[in-house]
Image: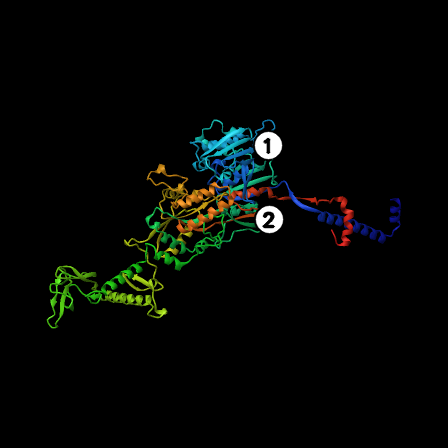
Amino acid sequence: MNRLLHLIGAMSRIERWAFASLSALCILSMFGLLRLFYTQSTVLVPSKGGIYIEGSVGELLPLNPWFTVANDVNRDIVSLIFAGLLKYNPQTRKIEPDLATMDVSGDGKLYKLKLRENLYWHDSTPENPHPVTADDVVFTFKSIQHPQFPNTILQQNFRGVTVEKLDSRTVHFRLDEPYSFFPSNLTLGILPARSFEGIPPAKLNQTLDFAFSPIGAGPYALKSIVQTDLSTEVTLERFSRSLKPDYQLERIILRIFPDYPTLLSDLRNLDGVRLVPRNDEGEPIIPKRFRAMNYTLPQYVALFFNLEKPSLRDEQLRLGLQLGTDKQAAAETVHESFIIDTPLLEIDVADWRYNFDPQSAQGALFSSHWNLPEKVRLQRLLEIREANDMGLLSLDPVVLLDTGAVLTFTGSSVDVKPGSRVNGIPLQPLPTQSGAWIVGLPTHGGTGSLRIGENLIRLTNEKGATMDSFYLNRVTDPKQYRAAEGEQKLVDLFLASRDGKIPAEERIAVQDLALENGMLRRRTSEDPVSVRVNDAGEVLSLTLLTSASPPSYRRVAEAISEQWAALGVKVTVEVPETQDAFQSRLLRREYDVLLFGQSLLDNLDSYPYWHSSGVQKLTGERRDLRLDAYNLSQYSSFKADSLLETARRTRDENERLEALQELREVLKKDVPAIFLYSPLYTFAHHEDVLGVEFGTLSLHSDRFLTLHRWYVKQDRVFQPGKSWLSFLGWIPSLFSGGD
C-alpha cells in the first residue's frame, strides 16, 4: 500500500487525474458487471405485503354466509372472511377440499368430511384458542335445517340430508337419494357455534353484532368498517393459518360506492373496479394503466313462455316465435355478444338448431292456431268462390245497391220445378223468354231482403229443401264497391299464382296482401303487419313482463316487442316500478312471457329450473306460493323430468352428458323458452397488481378464489444452482456468448 501511495505521489498532476479516472471506471465496470450478473442470475417472485383497494357499487348488508344469496357485494366480502368445507376451483372447474377432505360412498349417499388439523377462527388467541371443530360444522348445517330458519331458499339445499358428528373433526352427511351435485352445497362458509349461543333459529338473521363484526376461518379477517363521504370501506387483513396456499396481499380494502359516477370520481385511489360500467357504444370505461378482464358466468337471459296460458300451449306458435326472434339484434341493443341457444351451458352449443329464420317462422305460425287476418279473409273468399262456382245460381258476387232498390236476377227453369223459391220469394216465369224465371230481392226489409255485407242466398224446391246457395256481398258506397271488386281480382290473381298460370314475377302470396276496412288489397312498404287472430276472432296479444333491474332488460324487451310485431303478434311490455311489485307478479305467474335471467352456479344444475317440481302451484292463496318455484315457464314433461333426475343422480360423467344431450333435444322440441344471451362482465385492475387470473367463474366473488396468486410486491431470488459464488465462473460466458 505504501509503495502504491509513493507511486501516486510521484505522478504528475495529469497522471494522477488519469489514474483516478481509470480507477473509477474500473470500479463502475465492476458494479455494472455485478448488476448484470445479478439480473441474469435471478428471477422476480411475488413477495408478501402490500394493499389492494377495490371499488364496487352496491350496499353493504349484514355479513353472514347464511344470508348473502342475493347480494353480490356481500358475497365478495363473505368469500374472504369465511371458508367452507369445500371450495370451487375456477381453474379446474371442480369442487376441491378447503377446510376438510371428503370421501363419498359407492352408492353416492354418504359423504364423510374430515376437518384438517390446526384450523382456528379469527378470534382465536394463544391465551384463548378457538379451533374449528365438528360442532361448528354440525351447528352450521343443522341450523339451516331447522323449520324456523329464516332462509328457505338455502334450506332446500339440505332437505333429506342427515348431519351427524362422528368425532371432533369428522362429520357425516347422509342423503336420502344420490345427488352428484351435493358437494357444491358444502362450499357454504362455516360459522362458529360459540358466537350464536342462546339465539333462536328464527332470529339468526337478526344477529347484527356478529354480522358487522364477523368471525370466520377464511384467509382474511375483518379489521374495520368505516363510512366515509364517498364510500363504505371494509378493511380485511391476512389471517395466519395452516392451510395452503399462502396469500401475498397483506390487506384488502373493499370500497362500496352508491353509484358509478361517484366511484369513477375517486378512481385514482383504487387498484381495481369490480364491475366496470360501459359507455353508449358498449365499451368498458377503462382508465389509463388499468387492464380489463372480460368474463361470463353460468347465466342466461331468456324469454320464458307461461305454458299455463291457453294461447301459448300452441307448440307451433312458440316455435314460430323462436324462429322469428333475432337474438343477435336484440342482444346488440345492450351490447351483449355471447348468444346462447340452450340452458344446458356445459354441453356443446356450436350446432344451433334455431337460428333466426323469418321465412321458417312464418311457416310455423301458418301451421299454428293463429293466423294473419289477411289469410283468414283470403281463406273465406276462397271458400265463397268454391261454393259460388258450383250449383244453379249464377250472379256477380258483389253488388252495389242502395236501400230501397231491388236486386233482380234470372235463371233457367230447366232444373227448377214450379213452387221453387229464392230466399223464400217464389220464382216467377220470365214473360218475354220461354224456359226462364225471374226474382227480385228487396233491400228495405221483409222476406228475402238483402242486408249490407255478406248474404247467403238460398234456392229451395217446392218442399223447402235447399237446392243451391250463393254468397253475395252487398255494398251501398261506390268506394266500397271498387274495393270489393278489387278484392275479387286479387282472389283471381292468387288462384292463378297458386296454380302457376302466370309468370313468377307476377305472382302473389298471403304476405303480399293487406286488410283494410275488412277487405283485401295489395300491401305497400308502409303497411304494418296485422295482428294474428284465431278461429274465434281473438287477437294474439301477449304481455311481456320484465324487471326494472338491470335497465338492459327493458331495452331487450322492447326490441323483442318490435321483432314479434313483424310476425303479427301484439306485445305489451310491462316493467313494474318496484322490485317488490315485480317479485309479486313473478311468484303469481302473472305474465304471458317473462324476460329474466337465471344462474346455474358452479354445478351447472338445471334441475330447479326445468323439473316439474319447480312449477308454481297457483291455488289463489298467497300462503301457497313458493319462493323456490324456479320453473318460470310452468314447464312439465315426464321425459325432461326423467333426464334431469338422471343428470343429478349419476356419478358417471358419460351417462350425465348423454342425459343432457337428450334433454337438449326435448327442450328444442317443446320450446318452453327462447334463450337469448349470457351477460358479459368486465373487471379492471391497475397494471401494478400482478398475477390476476380468473379461470371459469360461477359467481362474481369467485375471482377471489385465485387471490392467492395476486401480488403488488416482488423480490429477486437466485435461480437454482446460482449464487454470488457463481460470479467468477459467469465472467467467461460474456466472451463465449453463453449464460
Q: Is residue 388 above or below residue 628?
A: below
Front residue of this view, candidates 277 and 198: 198
| SS at circle 1 | loop
Earlier in the chain: of badge 2 and badge 1, it is 1
- Examine the rendering and report whether any part of residue 612 can be seen: yes
Q: Report the amino acid beneath label 2.
A: Glu
Front residue of this view, candidates 103 and 189: 103
The quarter of the rendered structure image containing the N terminus is top right
Horizontally, residue 379 falls left or right of residue 40, namely: left
Residue plotted at (20% across, 60% down): 456
Q: Report the amino acid beneath label 1.
A: Glu
Q: CA distance from mark 2 to mark 1?
A: 38 Å
- Examine the rendering and report whether any part of residue 299 can be seen: no
Residue 70: give x, y in percent of width and height. 46, 41
Kindly identify which residue carries mark 1: 117
Number of the label disc, if any, that sits on residue 670: none
Horizontally, residue 434 falls left or right of residue 612, namely: left
Residue 453 appears in which quarter of the rendering? bottom left
Kindly identify which residue carries mark 2: 687
| SS at circle 2 | loop
Residue plotted at (63% across, 40% down): 48
Front residue of this view, candidates 555 and 739: 739
